[in-house]
Structure formats: C-alpha cells, structure tokens
Image (tube, helix red, strand yellow):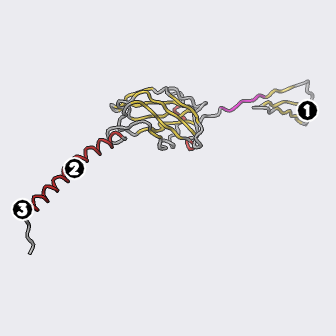
Amino acid sequence: MFKLSKYSLGAKLGAMMIVVGLVLLLVPVNLIIADANGGASGRTSPVEWGGQGKDSQACEKDGEGPRDAEEGWIHWVYNTVGDAENPVLTLKDLGNKALGTYNNASESTENGQGVWHFYTPFFDVNNLKATITFDGLSGPGRGLVISDYCPGIDEPETGSISLTKSNLLAGDSASFTVTGPGDYDESFTLPDD
C-alpha cells in the first residue's frame, strides 16, 4: 500500500499555499490594470466613437442653444468627465479625411456627473469617425455619443410673378413673366378669348 511521509505532506501543503498566495497577489494587480485601461473606474485617452446616436436626428431642437437647422449640426456628448480635462474632439470620414478638430466643449453636470458637450457642423453620420482625447482619467460613463443632430433644412427659395397689362381690349391677349429660384425665368402669353 501507499505510505505518505510527514515531509511530503508538508511540502505539498506549502506548495499549495505558495500558489494560492501568488493568485491572490496577481488578481488585484490585474484589476488595477483593467481599471487604468477603461474598466469600471474610468477611461484613458483616446476614446473612439462606436456609432451610438446615429438614429438621433432631431431637427425640432432648432434654436435650442447653438443648434441651427438651416446649417445643420451634431451635438456630441462625452459622459462622464471624471478627473479629465482639456478635451479635443476630432472628426474624420471613413476614408480618414480630416473633417475638423474641436476644443470648444462646454461642461454640464447631469445626475451628479460631469458631461462635455460639443457642437459641430453636420457631417454624414454614416461616413464618420470621431475620437476624443483628454488629459487625465475620465469617469466610467457611456463614453462618446451623438445626443442629437440635424442635417440642415433647405429653406425654399421664393420667386416672383410680374404681370404686364397694356391697354387690353376685349379679345386681346395678356402676357406675364414668372421669375423663380436660380435661373428660372419664363414668359407666358395668354390667348385671347
């Protein structure tokens, strides 16, 4: 039969305690690394936009703050600020063509958390990449999202109608000119009845 010596049992227990001790030491180190890289306690810069808010068209917000429906806008929100500062939002198209860099964030507090707001001109949200950079560690919120946008509303151009009346007698014809948007300009003559 199999016989254990007192040294082999102690050696086995000691080895197991060393392994357990190493595991307990490594778990907190892994948690600290995860937190520094965007875990539950915050994010480091840069943060990429993941497409959230592409369905947030809201032209009815025209006139609220800096929103201008005639020109179009995108209202970007970064949630939450945490201890971060100096935010810069960079926009590119999917071909990596630079569209703009914005460092004009305003900050508000929502539900006790700091939030950055950026207003940019409108760009096609389906052909857009966005990145926010900042100094420090931000909070654990939702990240960079489009809150609302409007592609711009074309105001209809107006034209004019000018009528010319020249001593019409019964049976004479009348003429007039219609001037419209752009280069539209046409003259008509009404038949005599």
Q: Nearer the viewer, residue 121 or 163?
A: 121
**Which quadrant is the C terminus positioned in?**
top right
Nearer-N-terminus badge (2/1): 2
Give me the disc on residue 22. Answer: 2
- The residue closer to the viewer here, 162 or 24, is 24
For label 1, the residue is 173
* x and y, in percent, of residue 112 in the image: 33, 31
Residue under the image location 37 percent in, 41 percent down: 38
User: In the image as oriented, which residue stretches furthest toward the bottom?
Assistant: 1
Nearer to us of marks 1 and 3 is 3
The numbered mark, 1 or 3, whose residue comes first in the sequence reads 3
Question: Number of marks in the image?
Answer: 3
User: In the image, which residues are magenta?
Assistant: 155-160
Residue type, label 3 = Lys
Q: Label for residue 6?
A: 3
Marks 1 and 3 in Cβ contact (< 8 Å): no
Q: Residues within 10 Å of mark 2 (few under 14, many from 20)?
A: few
Distance from label 2 to label 3 (Cα)?
Answer: 25 Å
